[in-house]
Amino acid sequence: MRLDDIPLYIVDLAKRLGATDAAAKLTESRRVMIRFSNNEVTVSKVFLESSIDVFVMIEKHRAATTISALSARNIKKSVENLVKIAKSTPPADIYAPLPQGPFTYNSELIKAPKISLNPDRLTLYVESAVKHALEKGAKRVAGTLDAHRSRITLATSGDVYASQEKSGIEISVRAFVSELATGHAVSVAGKIEDFSPEEAGRIAGEIAKAASDSKPGEPGRYMALLGPMVFADIVSQVGSLSSAFLVDAGQSFLVDKIGSEVASEKFTLIDDPTLAGSFGARAFDDEGVPTRRNIIVEKGVLKTYLHNSITAKKFSVETTGNAGIIVPYPWNLIVEPGNKSPEDLLLEIDDGIYVTNDWYLRYQNYRTGDFSTIPRDGMFRVKNGEIVESIRELRISDNMLRILRNIVDLSRLRLWVRWWEVEVPTLAPYALISELNFTKSTV
Amino acid sequence: MEDIAKFVVDKAQERGAKYAEARLQIDLRESIIVKNGVLEASVFEENRGLGIRVLVDGALGFASINSFRKNNVENALKHAIKLAKSTLRVMRQKISMGEGELGYGKVEVKPRVSFGSVDLESRVNLLKEADEQALHVASIVSVKAPSRMMTLDTWITEKIVLTSDGANIYSVTPRAALFALITVFHPQKGTAQRYFNLGETGGWEVVEKWDLPKIFHNETYSLSRILIEAVKPPEGEMDVVLGPEVVGIVSHESCGHPSEADRILGREAAQAGETFLKPDSIGLRVGSPHVNVVDDPTLKGSFGFYLYDDEGVKARRRTLIKEGIVNEFLHNRETASVFGVESNGSSRSVAYNREPIIRMANTFFLPGDYTEEEIFEDIKDGLYIKSFMEWNIDDRRFNQRYVGLEAYRIENGELKNMVKNPVLEITTTGLWSSVDAASKKLEFQAAYCGKGDPIQGIPVWTGGPHIRLRKVRVGGAHI
């Protein structure tokens, strides 16, 4: 049996065994990662993998599995076992049949741009990023280059049988002038023309250089300019916690907020996997539903949660094309731009702070949105519209909803962000936030 | 399995690898998710494949593949070698594998009650019973528990680690883990949330021992009281007692992570960060003489249990801080070579397709000689922080914040009213230096520690006794 034929075979077998619904997703992927630190490569990795995710329902009885040993015998045994388990599984509260196709998919999203995984070429990108950071004054540079190509073939009992390619390349660069003077930047692209390791290296180096001679910052509430890396972290929280599954679990500050003002009118957040050539582009979700452009927050008002067919039925709405079989996910988050340049936003600060990056975001209470996160890399004191000094050792300790409502303005310039801290690719602008609360260690 | 591993190691050497390592790993996992009393999903996963590491001309290459066919495996090996060679021009220092006590043999943790003997319905019913307890106790305390989510995972990890210099370890390790998130609500008080993890090595007997209905009863009761009773905490300098849950996370974040030798060398600088400790920090005083923190993978039944690491090196207890002084770092064979020491068996990987890197196992503050009564008795006016929700620490592992969940005022040695979300925002040396007592009783909590790229969430225990901090500044959340 050809690999491509396996999903259809599985769906057919599951139905013959008694499943009312079945979906089988074959993922064939090839990924190369080069990690570097202290200006040199520390390890290079290649991942060559094929696996199949299978989901079956016998009305309200559900079970899922991942099969990584793709022999015909093992696949048959695994599917038989899965249906047997589904039959013995206690029922869920609702039954939502898998969406009925066949569907028509955007042909631009079915094919992905070619990304080379040639080791020599990828190593050149690493060299280039390191070189540009060093040229801007960095003493040492660390990071990760990650390139991938994959193909997903999906079959469902809803007459879906389709394939889509995915590819992407990203680099995360952290530059050090000293232990305390660091800068971080990324380049994230779905096609090679949009990929710029040089730019990531240059920006990381510039921030690190500017962050030299830092002083401990003073806690308090400030007008703050958040760079795209920081704002992407905040925004990806909004996107991820708009998953209806997490809303239903109480793991979201967006519970019961549909139709409510959750942010300043300056803020519009869209999940748009239909943007061909972008990192998070995709033609269909894990139920075979064509993806679509979903406006999550429009001019500050929460418009929708993200759904698969099961959560959609539970919330009495239509699926938004964001399945995850169990948990719906955002694919490709985009913040609508503002009208000003980052420099103009800085000019609006009389007495404030500019934060270039953050990490380690943790909630005290997901339901209320109380959280803290740690600015890292360059952080600067701003007075009368100008950066006056480099500061350190502050923590953003605030509330998600308050931050969103305190958005004063956004920049026209946006950058794609994805790295260790920000899992969902996010196109984020600079954001001017009023009254942002900063705290610090006291002993 | 051993045939394939041997094939890889032999082929790698034929192709010029100075060091080769093959790790075949199969994780068989069953998970159930119960949300608000309803089974959302049953998930069964077989994650099996081969992780290969090669050292070629001093460059380190890794490949993973989930086919055991010899031609596919050889192809993956070729890729790893080619990739490593391509990066040679961006290397100044050649990597080498240091010494370590390499193992040969079998480590099998045998469950008393096998996972296969417990059917799905029994598992679901157990979680539903726990969920009902949460609802029941909330109603008694006159709050609502509108959201409850729990995930129960059981899995068996079977693996073989074979290296070109003689390690050959076969191991079978069953584990069970539970994640829970509980939300309680009161119309006038708002919401409070608690999440927690349970995790141990062993079979279903572990889950039986937990007594989940009782745990959910107690956790929901405590959370409801926090919502209803907790008042604004006092602010200022005072004595603080930290409970084992908080001491565990502090030991993990402020001792375990800073002691990882790969961070010290900057290898994680762009992701999980570095550390305030330097290669010459052994012997540096970072805390009071009451501070003793160890990491020990060999604790039977622990979530982070192993006897040989993923480089085949024998595991042992590592004393990281001894009487307030930095005593030892966590090493794999790569960093051991740089530091001129032997590996202390800290190399771990969460799955076949992840590179083994330096990880903690079970990191805990060693017990002292105080009774719990003695810890509290001479505090005139202070705070007891028993549990926490929010925490974070900077990427040098120096500035940290712990926001208490269950916390009490201490007056004249006695626990008084509950206080809401006291904040301890403090430096690592500030915290460790203020410790003046530790109690005798040790407790552990399960957690997943995140590190590496791609990130690896690896099972660990964190733990400790009650410890007393003298004169530290405590604040309120102010948000």
Image (cartoon, coloured by chain):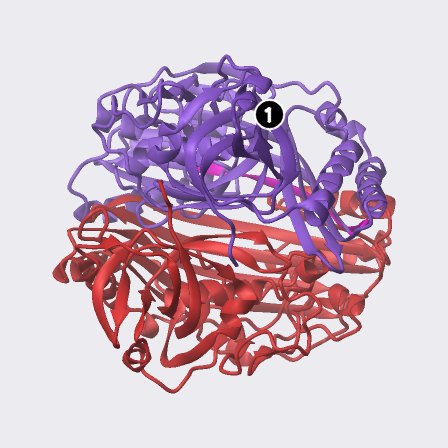
Chain colours: A red, B purple
Q: Residue furthest top?
A: B369
Q: How far across and how far down the image is residue B320, in percent?
A: 37, 23
Q: Which residues are magenta?
A: B36-51
Dot 1 amino acid type: Thr
- Above-or-below relation of B337 to A372: above
A358 left or right of A362?
A: left
Q: Residue at x 53, y 76 (%)?
A: A269
Front in this rendered view, residue B129 or B316: B129
Q: How far across and how far down the image is residue B287, in percent?
A: 34, 26
Q: Is residue B46 magenta?
A: yes
Observer able to see residue B382: yes
- Above-or-below relation of A97 to B33: below
Q: Residues within 10 Å of mark 1 (few under 14, many from 20)?
A: many
- Above-or-below relation of A135 to B402: below
Q: How far across and how far down the image is residue A354, in percent?
A: 32, 67
Q: Is residue A326 magenta?
A: no
Front in this rendered view, residue A101 or B315: B315
Q: Residue at x 18, y 44 (%)?
A: B91
Front in this rendered view, residue A92 or A250: A250
Q: How far across and how far down the image is residue B338, in percent?
A: 22, 28
Q: Residue furthest bottom?
A: A339
A13 left or right of A391?
A: right
Magenta segment, principal secondary structure? strand
Which residue corresponds to mark 1?
A: B173
